[in-house]
Amino acid sequence: MNLKSIVPWNKEKRSLGRWPEDSNPFTQLQRRMNSLFDDFFSRSSLDLWGGKTGAFQPRIDVSETDKEVRITAELPGLDAKDVEVTMASNMLTLKGEKKVEKEEEDGDYYHSECSYGYFDRTIELPRGIDAANGKAKFKRGLLKVTIPKKLEAQSHRGRIELTEG
């Protein structure tokens, strides 16, 4: 076996040889890594309605003040009648479904990115909330839930003086 035939450089010419494009191991590695990332991101939660799986995970913001907890969820394409909000202990659950709206047309579909499906998302909230007095508002695909904290759970902040020494 001639070792010169399998090394990418030629000692006689003292220059780096070129791999054929299809057999270059670095090009093959790059293609495999690109494919891996493409597969991962096509199935991730970056796709709002879950792409091929049909699973929906609404995007949410959770914020907390001294007196309340606020949850905002984006639910585009849904109406208030399609959404259910429940509380159990310190767990907030959002459920709903985006239904297919049938519209018959003459013609062929070549590409569709519209998805429909059921979602169920549970969010753990801090202890000491007053679930009985929680309020939820839904407007233009945006759900806003506000849950006050019980008096004993509210922060009573004060300044502590520092001394040197």
Image: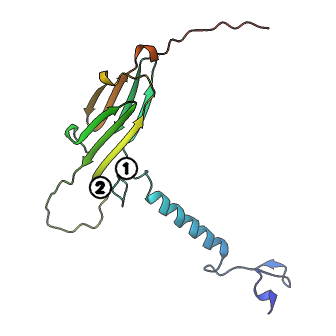
Q: Quadrant of the C terminus?
A: top right
Could you say whether the residue bearing mark 2 is in a helix, strand or loop?
Answer: loop
Q: Residue at x 66, y 71 (%)?
A: 26
The picture places residue 90, in percent across and down from the top left corner, at 40, 30
- Callout 1 touching callout 2 (CB < 8 Å): yes
Label 1 Cα neighbours within 10 Å, binned few <14 / some 14-19 / many ≥20: some
Label annotation for residue 87: none
Residue underneath mark 1: 48
- Horizontally, residue 152 falls left or right of residue 133, namely right
Dot 1 or dot 2, earlier in sequence? 1
Instruction: Identify which amino acid the numbered label 1 is placed on.
Output: Leu
- State how far apart marks 1 and 2 are (Cα): 9 Å
The picture places residue 121, in percent across and down from the top left corner, at 36, 43
Q: Residue at x 57, y 69 (%)?
A: 32
Residue underneath mark 2: 115
Label 2 Cα neighbours within 10 Å, binned few <14 / some 14-19 / many ≥20: some
The answer to which of 3 and 49 lies nearer the viewer is 49
Residue 147, compared with residue 158, is above or below; it is below
Q: Is residue 59 visible?
A: yes
Q: Quadrant of residue 76?
A: top left
Instruction: Identify which amino acid the numbered label 2 is placed on.
Output: Ser
Residue 80, compared with residue 97, is above or below; it is above
Residue 112, compared with residue 11, is above or below; it is above
- Horizontally, residue 99 falls left or right of residue 157, namely left
The picture places residue 145, in percent across and down from the top left corner, at 33, 29
Q: Quadrant of residue 10?
A: bottom right
Q: Residue at x 28, y 67 (%)?
A: 110
Could you say whether the residue bearing mark 1 is in a helix, strand or loop?
Answer: loop
The answer to which of 113 and 43 lies nearer the viewer is 43
